[in-house]
Image (cartoon, rainbow, N blue to C red):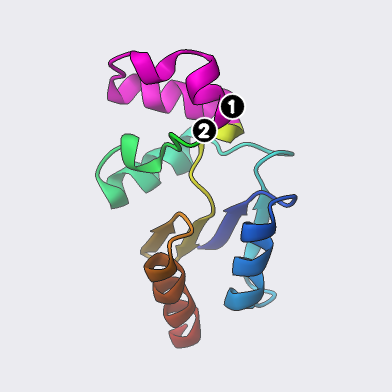
Amino acid sequence: MKKIFHLKTCSTNQRILKELDPGADVELQNIKEQNIDEETLDFLKEKVGSYEALFSKKAMKYRSMGLNEMNLSEEDYKKYMLEEYTFLKRPFIINGDEVFVGNSKNVVEAAVESFKRS
């Protein structure tokens, strides 16, 4: 599977998509229009080791909902991400068995290299 979960209105996500230059064989999913499904979230969790690693603590709702003051469990992280796209780190990039999460320079560079090889 080749798929990129992104936020269409995010300039950082737009820049990363340009860098990746995904081909026609890559499915793009705007998470604001269609949030991630549980099966895919579980797949990503298996690849990265935890739901917390997929969760964006930079989301405005993280503080406004008081989640920053709670001791969240793995199931809590999963629940919030399935309910609200804003809690997903983005983008999520799947290229076969390789998974890249977030927008750090190292992650984006690794994803670009992965797409060049495939």
Left or right relative to 72: residue 117: right
The reply to whether the C-beta atoms of the residues labelled 1 and 2 are less than 8 Å apart is: yes
Which of 87 and 96 lies nearest the eye of the viewer? 87
Instruction: Identify the residue under disc 2.
Output: 87
Name the residue at 38% across, 45% down: 43
The quarter of the displayed image where residue 26 is located: bottom right
Q: In the image as oriented, which residue stretches furthest toward the bottom?
A: 117
Q: Which amino acid does label 2 sit on?
A: Phe
* Magenta-drawn segment: 59-84
Determine crowd level at label 1: few under 14, some 14-19, many 20+ residues with C-alpha closer than 10 A. some
Which of 43 and 82 lies nearest the eye of the viewer? 82
Residue 74 drawn at (x, y percent): 29, 25
Left or right relative to 32: residue 106: left
Residue 8 drawn at (x, y percent): 73, 52
Q: In this view, does 44 lie above or below 86?
A: below
Residue 106 drawn at (x, y percent): 37, 69
Q: Looking at the rendered structure, which numbered label has been put on residue 84?
A: 1
Residue 63 drawn at (x, y percent): 49, 21
Name the residue at 51% across, 33% down: 87
Name the residue at 54% across, 36% down: 37
Q: Can residue 96 be seen in this view?
A: no
Q: Can residue 69 be seen in this view?
A: yes
Mark 1: secondary structure: loop
- What is the C-alpha distance between the residues marked 1 and 2? 6 Å
Q: Which amino acid does label 1 sit on?
A: Glu
Predominant SS of the magenta segment: helix
Mark 2: secondary structure: helix
Determine crowd level at label 2: few under 14, some 14-19, many 20+ residues with C-alpha closer than 10 A. many
Name the residue at 45% across, 13% down: 66
